[in-house]
Image (cartoon, rainbow, N blue to C red):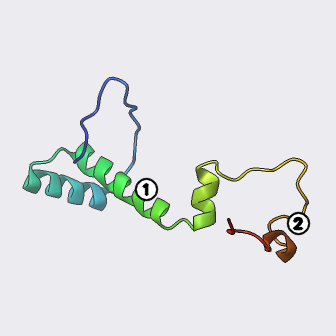
Amino acid sequence: MIKRPTVKDYRITVRFPAELRRRLKDVAHRTRTRESDLVRGAVERQLAAEEAALTAYEQVKKAGLIAVVRGAPPDLSTNPKHFEDFGKS
């Protein structure tokens, strides 16, 4: 469900070609939905699709979960000898 704008929301200006604006107005009228709600929903869907298309590495990086371990060997993540006992209790 699309949330209604609040006082803390931001306003932006977007320019549309005449044909796209006509289509937007037609859909808004037909569905009894405000044009701004249609645009907001389209942007939210596009951003969700972009985020879903991120690789696992990009998602972890975006979440801030990639870090540098100071004092660790420089080949810690690539040298098989560092994994010999990995996962063993």
Q: Is residue 9 left or right of residue 76?
A: left
Q: Nearer the viewer, residue 85 or 79?
A: 85
The three-letter code of the residue at mark 1 reads: Leu
Q: Residue 80: x, y in percent?
A: 83, 76
Q: Which numbered dot is residue 14?
A: none
Q: Nearer the viewer, residue 50 or 62?
A: 62
Q: Which residue is mark 1?
A: 47
Q: Quadrant of residue 77?
A: bottom right
Q: Upstream in the sequence, badge 2 or badge 1?
A: 1
Q: Is residue 87 left or right of residue 81?
A: left
Q: Residue 49: x, y in percent?
A: 42, 63
Residue at point 57% right, 59% down? Answer: 59
Residue at point 22% right, 60% down? Answer: 23
- Residue furthest to the front in view is 89
Q: Which residue is mark 2?
A: 75
Q: Residues within 10 Å of mark 2 (few under 14, many from 20)?
A: few
Q: Residue 19: x, y in percent?
A: 28, 61
Rounded to the nearest angstrom, the CA distance separating label 2 from label 1 is: 36 Å
54 versus 71 height, above or below: below
Residue at point 24% right, 36% down? Answer: 4
Q: Secondary structure at mark 1?
A: helix
Query: Which tag is nearer the camera, tag 2 or tag 1?
Result: 2
85 versus 59 height, above or below: below
